[in-house]
Image (cartoon, rainbow, N blue to C red):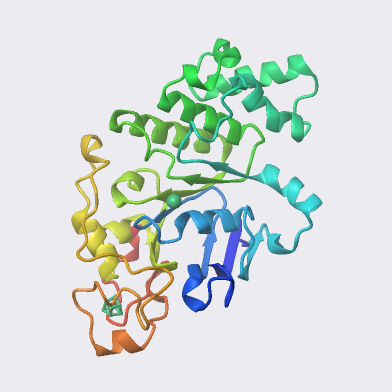
């Protein structure tokens, strides 16, 4: 079966080579040859520390930015080759929820106008009354009173604004939503509510999420599969159970050992790893994690490990990853 999305050798380099400011060090390889699928109806969590390329990867999938190399297929169609007119139609199928619900909503427009805009653009509700009716329905779906549609974003709390951002994203019946750290800016007590809402909406509508987060605790409940990113590359990907119970990459293991138990009240605690993430303008050779890896050997400094299968559906990019002994039936 064709996956909903297939990214192949997808890469993004920011900054021109030999540009005004000189040499290759101006270049930042934000996403470095990433290959993965998103299946219809699933939630793929994309996890990694700040600056590892998660948001850039999300934007590449939606073609909000153009890749430097590689392709993105959406339902089999290469979106990197679509004209802007074709891309506009495609936008209805792919939506984004931003981290900062306040920054992503225009302050002078009412909630009704904000949610109604995509309905108008895609001709999904013709006429003012039809649009208001649909907005009322959407507000109800995200747990806000329909009467709020004439209010302005500043009259809402952070959690309520994120509900508006979600209503706007689902208004056009998308097949795919990139949720870029949708709960990171919210109070811990609100995070679980928003995640539950996102899950309920997905259950009803059947769309897929790429759910971007900087730690593994946040995505524990919502993910079907987890991809771990480090310095622009996916270093491990697999079914949730295997990633949490039997991670094979030392970076995933470090993230998990630093992550708190999945209690709601500890969900926002920070991951602490030794050393700093190297600059993406100067990615270490070989395994890019070798400068921080507790078990690095000489080969790690020389040869880049491929992303290789360690269990059905689980892949890890480490020279010392071993076949995962957990039986598949238990891991489902
Ligand atoms: Fe560590 Fe080497 Fe594995 Fe990289 S390849 S994660 S440096 S052991
Ligand atoms: Mg980001």
Q: Is residue 325 left or right of residue 175?
A: left
* Residue 178 position (above or below residue 197): below
The quarter of the rendered structure image containing the N terminus is: bottom right
Nearer-the-camera pick, 14 or 268: 14
Q: Quadrant of residue 2?
A: bottom right
Residue drawn at x 63%, y 52% is: 64
Q: Is residue 319 left or right of residue 128?
A: left
Q: Is residue 169 left or right of residue 252?
A: right
Q: Is residue 246 visible?
A: no
Q: Is residue 28 visible?
A: yes
Q: Is residue 117 left or right of residue 222?
A: right
Q: Quadrant of residue 319?
A: bottom left
Residue drawn at x 75%, y 47% is: 88
In the rendering, at what x and y percent does residue 180 appear? 47, 46
Residue drawn at x 32%, y 56% is: 241
* Residue 199 position (above or below residue 6): above
* Residue 308 position (above or below residue 225): below
In the rendering, at what x and y percent does residue 283 appear? 39, 75
Nearer-the-camera pick, 207 or 149: 149
* Residue 181 position (above or below residue 239): above
């Amino acid at each position: 079966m064709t996956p909903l999305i297939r990214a192949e050798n997808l890469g993004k380099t920011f900054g021109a080579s030999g540009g005004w400011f000189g040499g290759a060090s101006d270049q930042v390889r934000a996403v470095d040859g990433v290959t993965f699928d998103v299946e219809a109806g699933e939630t793929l969590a994309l996890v990694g520390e700040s600056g590892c390329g998660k948001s850039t990867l999300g934007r590449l999938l939606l073609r909000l930015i153009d890749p430097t190399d590689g392709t993105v297929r959406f339902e089999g169609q290469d979106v990197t080759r679509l004209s802007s007119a074709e891309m506009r139609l495609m936008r209805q199928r792919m939506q984004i929820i931003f981290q900062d619900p306040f920054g992503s909503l225009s302050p002078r427009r009412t909630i009704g106008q904000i949610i109604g805009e995509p309905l108008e653009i895609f001709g999904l509700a013709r006429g003012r009354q039809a649009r208001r009716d649909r907005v009322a329905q959407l507000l109800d779906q995200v747990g806000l009173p329909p009467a709020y549609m004439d209010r302005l974003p500043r009259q809402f709390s952070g959690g309520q604004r994120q509900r508006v951002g979600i209503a706007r994203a689902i208004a056009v019946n998308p097949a795919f939503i990139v949720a870029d750290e949708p709960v990171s800016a919210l109070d811990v007590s609100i995070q679980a509510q928003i995640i539950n809402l996102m899950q309920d909406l997905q259950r009803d509508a059947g769309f897929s999420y790429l759910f971007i987060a900087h730690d593994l605790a946040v995505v524990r409940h919502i993910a079907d599969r987890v991809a771990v990113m480090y310095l622009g590359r996916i270093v491990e990907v697999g079914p949730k159970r295997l990633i949490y119970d039997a991670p094979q990459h030392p970076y995933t293991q470090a993230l998990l050992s630093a992550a708190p138990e999945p209690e709601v009240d500890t969900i926002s605690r920070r991951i602490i790893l030794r050393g700093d993430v190297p600059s993406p303008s100067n990615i270490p050779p070989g395994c890019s994690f070798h400068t921080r890896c507790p078990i690095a050997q000489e080969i790690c400094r020389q040869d880049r490990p491929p992303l290789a299968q360690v269990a059905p559906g689980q892949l890890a990019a480490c020279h010392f990853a071993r076949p995962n002994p957990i039986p598949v039936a238990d891991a489902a």
